[in-house]
Structures are given as structure tokens and as C-alpha cells.
Image (tube, coloured by chain):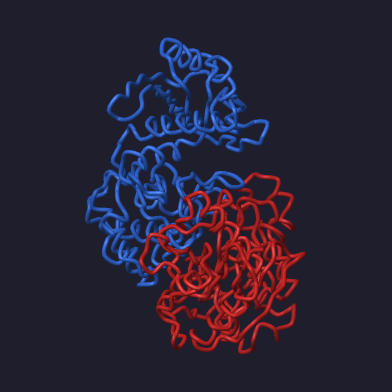
Chain colours: A red, B blue
Amino acid sequence: MFGGIEAGGTKFVCGVGTSPDDLETAQFPTTTPSETLAKVIGYFKDRTVRAVGIASFGPADLDPASASYGHITSTPKAGWANCDLVGEIKRVLRVPVLFDTDVNGALLGEARWGAARGLQDAVYMTIGTGIGGGALVGGRVVHGLVHPEMGHLRIPHDPRDSYPGNCPFHRDCLEGLASGPAIEKRWGKPARELPPDHPAWPLEARYLAMGLMNLTVALSPRRFLLGGGVMQQPHLFALIREEFARQLNGYVRHRDILDGLDEYIQPPQLGGHAGILGALVLAERAEQQSAATGGNA
Amino acid sequence: MFGGIEAGGTKFVCGVGTSPDDLETAQFPTTTPSETLAKVIGYFKDRTVRAVGIASFGPADLDPASASYGHITSTPKAGWANCDLVGEIKRVLRVPVLFDTDVNGALLGEARWGAARGLQDAVYMTIGTGIGGGALVGGRVVHGLVHPEMGHLRIPHDPRDSYPGNCPFHRDCLEGLASGPAIEKRWGKPARELPPDHPAWPLEARYLAMGLMNLTVALSPRRFLLGGGVMQQPHLFALIREEFARQLNGYVRHRDILDGLDEYIQPPQLGGHAGILGALVLAERAEQQSAATGGNA
């Protein structure tokens, strides 16, 4: 069995298994690091796992060459800044551990068992309180210099939209214009209370489609999965696909885009289990890497 | 020795070697496919190579699973549409062949011997008649659904810039606003005739920096190399770095960006040899892939 930890700001989900069919989970509220990690370790002490994957909230250090690899870094969440998540788990359980972000965890879960099953190149985006994303390129999660978070893409600001944007860094980047809080501030109501025929939605679709277009031009994924609170409006997918085709305007001549947008832009399929299942994929990779490096990973 | 072919719209460069130190090249004008390929094949017939890499103009089919892999596809260049470049070379020389775009070739050359030496994650952009780019992620060239060409990123159109953009698909995407022809149409003179203190340059830097910011947010490369005709203005680099820092506004907190922009955004180093050297890297990979698959690649 592999072990997975989905480390979130409000709860930690722990799981063991090898797939959705044999997955068993438990969850604990996120309190202090010592209390929370004691529960996590208690959970795994009773179960034998070959390796552990951690899909974590952040910001976190994902660079295996860094001294603070596997640490939560600068979070405002009390007590968690500089918490050595990987170190603690490794020290006690003595198995290979691999660490990535929560979004990349969901991406890996969906790419193995969900809406991007079998694809080597896919993007997972979550549109909610913020906008975050992760990308798979040739089967590997894109990290680079830092994890590319994708939410802060610069896009044209619709001239008819007088809302200035709410990103503290860039004001009207994608996150500043299209996150849940931006929708709420622009229209005076949370997204979930706006009816499907509200003008909020075509505008939201326009901004999100511009973000997807930029990611298409930069990464050329084989599929986009869009999740998060704002995407819990099924009518929004059709609007985004329409805007995406209109904006791309025939530039990318591939049948998956010209004729297959219903698949190309779609919701994730694993719901709340994507992250913990992705953590199992990370555990499997941790074991492979450890074997390849003679147990030193 | 490895063989390399840099297939361009005006000339074909052929080379043999293993590095810049032993590289030997010859070049032929691009005329008809049969005439040009006869010269290329004649060049390699006299030399023994273990594998051949081709860095080609396009559009071309880069999908190894496709029936038209290694073909030039829909070029307006007379006679070259549907030309089976890889098939012709393979049939005659009977060695492993690997194929990629000219931009990706330059990227691979620079990542091995040039300005991105040793980096696993880098972006190469060329700003000239058009804007094109290639990315290395974890040491591998990003392909995905189609090769991501990067030039058509959507960015905010500066409200003080009345030039509408000249992209036939998107009007004011990055290429439509910042390519060489866009500069010439906006200011009535080619870029190379505009003095360093001309207002064209801060605007150009603003647009290019927005493009780089989007690629940073999407891909998180460890370095950007900017080449092409428009970048033959050394003063432009300083302006782009300044704009990039201003726009990113502290969002990515990594020393390479906070303190190292002179390295983070820089010119390529191999000049006219980047493409042919990248073709040698492709040849090396062709041989490795062939060995890994028992000679079937």
C-alpha cells in the first residue's frame, strides 16, 4: 500500500491504497503543526506503507536541491511557517517521501484516474478564492524555478468592465479580475448567488478563456480541467468553450480544439478525492525514485 | 560524429560534429525540396554519422504518433507543403532521426553550450518578423498537443498606444503588438532605424515584459533567452528587465528574479550556430531513443 497526505489549511486528509478502488481515508482538522502531525503519524503508524506522497497547501519549497525542501515556507497560518513536513514524516515513518502542491496533487490524481486519464500533457486550474494551476508536461509536473501558479497571468482588461481588479500585486491580472472574491466585489453578491443569465458569467468566461488561451500558447496542453468554487456553475463551461474558440480564432489547427472543445475544456472527475489520490501517485513516484537512486531519495 | 540539419526557408545548414569545438558545416539555398534534399543527402553521403537531428522551419508535424511526423505541413513555400523531411533522410541514410522546430533547435543548442548551459528549465524566444518561442521543462522540450509557439499571448494593450496590432488571428496579441513588422507599422520606420531614445523602445519593452511575465507564471523557467532581429538592440534588454520587475511587482520571491535579472533575461550566446548545434543534440537524443527501443525509433 502507498500512503498519501493531502495537507490543507483547514484539514489534513490521510489515506492508504493503490487506486480509487481500495482507497481508505481519514481526516483531521488543521490545528498546530505538532498536534496535527501527531495525528497524521498515528494514522500511518497503524498501517504499513511503502512510501508516502504529500500534496500540500503553500507556499512551500518544492526544490529537492534546497535545504528547505518539503517545508511550508511563508504562510500566515499560525505556527506553520517553516514547518518541515517532509522531514517529520520521513524521520518517523522511514519510507521514501515525495512532496508537491495541492493543485499538482489534484492534477496527478486526475491524470491517473480522472478527467485527464492517460494524458501526458494537461493543465488543472482551480478558480475559487484565488486562481491556481498546475501543468503536466510529458507526464511530469512542471516545477521550474518555482512552482508556476498560473493565476497571475496578465490579460486584456475588458473596456466595458469598470471593476479595477483586486490582486494586491498586479491589480487586474487574471486572479484580480476572475477569482471568486473579484466576482463578489464587482457585482455585490457571491458568485453562487448570481443566476445563470447574469452578465457576470459572459465576462467571467471571457477572462477565463483568455487565461486558457495564454496557457495554450505557452504550454499546449492536451486538456484543461477547471475546478474550484466558481466552476460549480455547469453553464459556465459552455460559455468558456465558446469564448476560447472565438478568441483563438482558428490559430491552433488541431481537431481536439477545432472539434473537441467539450473534452478539451472540462470539469475534473474525482471530486474531493483528486488530491489524496494524487498523493498516492506521488508516493508511487517516491518509491520509484528511491529505487533508482539506491534508497537515497 | 552526429549529423545536424537546420532547415530554413531560405537556406539549409548541414553539419557534423559533437560540439562547437569540432563542428563543421556547409550550407545550401532552399530551392525545391528534391534539389535541396539531394544536396543535403550528398553532404551526408560523404560523411559517416551515427544519427541525424533536424531543426526545421514550419509549420511541421512534431507528433511521433502521427502518420505525418517529420513532415512540413501547411507552408506557403512552393513545393514544401507535405514534404516528408524525416522520411527522406531516414530512407537514404538509414540512421535514427529526430525532428523538432528551428526555435526548439536553438533552445537545445543554447541549453547545452550557450546562455542556458546546464539549465533544465529555460525559454528561448525570437522576436523578429514574428515572435516564436520554445521551452525546456525538466530537460525536455515542451511539445504537448502542438508545439506551443508562444508568440500569440494575449496581453493588455497599452491605452496610450493607438496602433491596433497586426496579427491576422488576434489583432493585438503579443506578436501583433511587438513583432518587427508591428514596430515598423506603428512608427513608420523599421526597428533598426529607431534611435535608442525613441519612445518605441519603452513600449516594446513593456509588451515583451508582459509576455515574459505570462510565461513566468505559466512555466516558471530558470532563464529567458531573447534573440531575433528586434533584440539586436542591446539597450532593449535593460528596459525589458526593468519593466519585468515592475510588472511582476515582487510576486515571485526568488533570488534569481529579485537579484539576478541580468542573468534571468539575457541574449543567446551561440549566434548563428545555435540551430545547427541544437540539431546535433537532437541527433544524440535520436541515438539514445533508438538504443532504448531496440533500434525501432
The reply to whether residue B162 is visible in this rendering is no
Query: Nearest the camera: B158 or B87?
Result: B87
The reply to whether residue B44 is visible in this rendering is yes
Query: Nearest the camera: B271 or A70?
Result: A70
Which residue occupies 32% across, 56% down? B264
Query: Residue A224 sits in which quadrant?
Result: bottom right
Which residue occupies 44% across, 25% down? B5
Image location (x, y in percent) of residue B121:
42, 51
Q: Quick one: which residue is furthest to the right in this view?
A: A21
Q: Classify residue A186 as left or right of residue A17.
A: left
Q: Total label count? A: 0
| B22 w.r.t. B115: above or below | above
Which quadrant is the C terminus of chain B positioned in? top right
| A196 w.r.t. B73: above or below | below
Query: Nearest the camera: A47 or B72?
Result: A47
| B170 w.r.t. A21: above or below | above
Which quadrant is the N terminus of chain B positioned in? top left
Image location (x, y in percent) of residue B43:
42, 14
Query: Nearest the camera: B96 or A27?
Result: A27
Image location (x, y in percent) of residue B233:
26, 47
Image location (x, y in percent) of residue A125:
60, 66
